Amino acid sequence: MNYDWSVVWRNADVLWEGTKVTVFLAVTTMAIAIPGGIVLALMRLSRIRALSIGSALFVEFFRNLPLILVIYTAYYILPVATGLRFSPVATAIVALSLNVSAYNGETFRGGIASIRQGQSEAGYALGMSRFRVMIDVILPQAVWRVLPILASTWVSLFKDTSLVSVISVGDLAFESMRVRSQTFRVLEMLTAMAVIYWMLGYPQAKLVDWVNNRYRVSE
Amino acid sequence: MSLDFSPVFTSWQFLLGGVGDTLALSALTIALSLVLGGAIGLTRCYGPSGLRWALIFYIDTMRSIPVLVVLVWTYFALPIVTGVTLPPFWAAASALTVHISAYVAEIVRAGITSVRPGQSRAAFALGMSRTQAIREIILPQALVRMLPALGSILSITIKDTAIAAVIAVPEYMNRSQTVAGQSFHPIEVFLAATVVYFAIIFPVTRVVDMIYARFAYLGRS
Amino acid sequence: MIEARSKTRRAETGSVPTVAYRDVKKRFGDFVALAGVSMEVRKGEVVCVIGPSGSGKSTLLRCTNGLELIDSGEITLDGEHLPNDWNGMRRVRQRMGMVFQNFELFPHKTALGNVMAGPKSVLKQPRKAAEQHAMELLRKVGLADKAASYPTQLSGGQQQRVAIARALAMDPEIMLFDEPTSALDPETIGEVLNVMKQLAEEGMTMIVVTHEMIFARRVGDWIVVMDRGAIVEQGSPEQIFESPTRERTRDFFSHLVWSG
């Protein structure tokens, strides 16, 4: 069996484009899913039952479904349900955002709940409204507190973006596998794909560890 | 939009077979991962240091690479390197096990290190050997603390089996794709899949939460 | 050392009470926290509420500024009935300052930021004005040099003094203190009590729930003894500390011998 590793270098530009798409998907999704998660958490804590239950249902729904299924379903449902044309990338971002927002919703809910009641009371004692207390006192502390968890969620998201390849979004996984189909260099391309993900993911995983350690020290 | 679920119902036996494969793959993966991951986690904590570094590397690597990549590599590339071709189900089981064991190992390590050092000191003060201390004092406490994370591994594994669809494992996701392709009613088929997966995963999540709530007091420091 | 201050004799004031409680009742489930409390706080008075744990002292304070809502009875501020709903009480809370046992400074803000929090968030004061006012208050409590410090960098006594400044920033009519020194190391208790005494001398109306008997005796104008949700006895410091009439009060003091 002869291996031709040069196929990797020859297609480096395509792989690079794929990598950029992967990063774009992850960054865009997180940019949506962090405010999304905060909104879901606030809804969950709202005294308006419809909001609270709605948020709980949303979170439970997306946390208990495989992401690949959400991606496929979004791909078929979105155009029909909204009457708009969705590019694969847009579909991917919608599916990923729904999924990660649900996880972040749980994360932020836990973070907010972990802030001592006395902090809210101190805010109320100054005459702050519930809204002000949440914005000025609770949320800043809660977000800081859940940073390590958000870091972990980021790493998972980064890996999960590979699933959008199934709806032909040109991310790293899709492009790698496309080159594999075109060149028949299966081992070389699949290994290259694994190695590139590893090179991107390993430092991120280590960063998460570092964040967790720093966090524990300063607690 | 009008929905026509008839393709789902006419193919119900085919799809049900998929549920069986999903559950089988999940159960097998979980069982193997718990054993392998447990062994790796314990070795990581108590084993010889040369081995520890290799295991840390393995664990961190699995944390860095997507499941999809491991699945695809195991099914398509491994045969080229080793000459061994695994049928889809077994390729998926191996790939998923190797991937998920890393997470189990991390959970085991975290559980063990979360037990206060004073506990082992107290055990030694009573005259216990290292093995005894680990087996009777550390591990039971560590186990309770691992439960919530291990419980979530259950849900994660079932969700990951759906990815095995891309390497032709005839589990539920794969079969849904087949029916969707043949019937030209993909929305209904995937909505049904949503219901089926939720019906499988949600109870698992709930039961794990309940079991943990029952036994959480054992792990409190 | 807390020096005695010139007191406001209750007999001399005789005006509309700043705060009046009439038969205030509050229960948590089966537990009766307040079993019909009636008392008055006059303007400029320092009322010290003492008694064993669980006697309802803190609950009474928290009902005063609406952190807890009462079940029945009424509380009046300057003669007007306090609304018994959360949002209605928000306005009232701006007229009262509260200092907590655990300080409850906002850890994500500096000392200056903490003192500014009320005026900026609630009164929507412009930043410059709020900052100046906050610095004055920090000077007043002796912590101007710690303005840029975060709560974790401050000692307990310093944190509590910042907390007092934070409450004062809202220009309250009355200050409520919920066991302000119970969580402090003995060395730092004095600095906080001195600030409180200074406030009292400036004429601030204060309700202080405390275990510090020396403070109550020297700085308090009126002492209220509570037990099991009811007022056992109330009177001037001389009366309560020197010649308590109720058995329960005598009991309480005798137990204090060991705790100082």
Image (spheres, coloured by chain):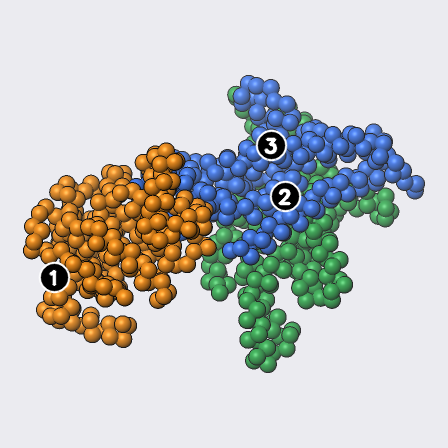
Chain that is orange in the image: C
- Name the chain letter of the residue that bears numbered label 1: C
Q: Name which residue type carries label 2.
A: Val
Q: Residues within 10 Å of mark 3 (few under 14, many from 20)?
A: few
Query: In this figure, which residue is indicated by the disc labeled 3?
Result: A28
Along the line of sight, the residue nearer the viewer: C260 or B121? C260
> Quick check: can you spot residue A24?
yes
Query: Which disc, if any, is residue C235?
Result: 1
Q: Amino acid at mark 3?
A: Thr
Give me the disc on residue A155: 2
Q: Nearer the viewer, residue C48 or A1?
A: C48
Quadrant location of the C terminus of chain C in the rendered image: bottom left
Which of the chains is green? B
Q: What kind of element bears circle 3?
A: helix
**Same chain assignment for discs 1 and 2:** no
Do callouts 1 and 2 mark residues in contact (Cβ within 8 Å)?
A: no
The chain drawn blue is chain what? Answer: A
Q: CA distance from mark 3 to mark 1?
A: 67 Å
* Viewer-side label of 1, 2: 1
Residue placed at 70% from the left, 51% from the top?
A: B60
Q: Could you say whether the residue bearing mark 1 is in a helix, strand or loop?
A: strand
The vertical placement of C53 against C154, above or below, is: below
Residue A52: image location, x then y, percent: 40, 38
Horizontal side of residue C145 vs A84, given as left or right: left
What residue occupies the far right of the structure in this picture?
Answer: A2
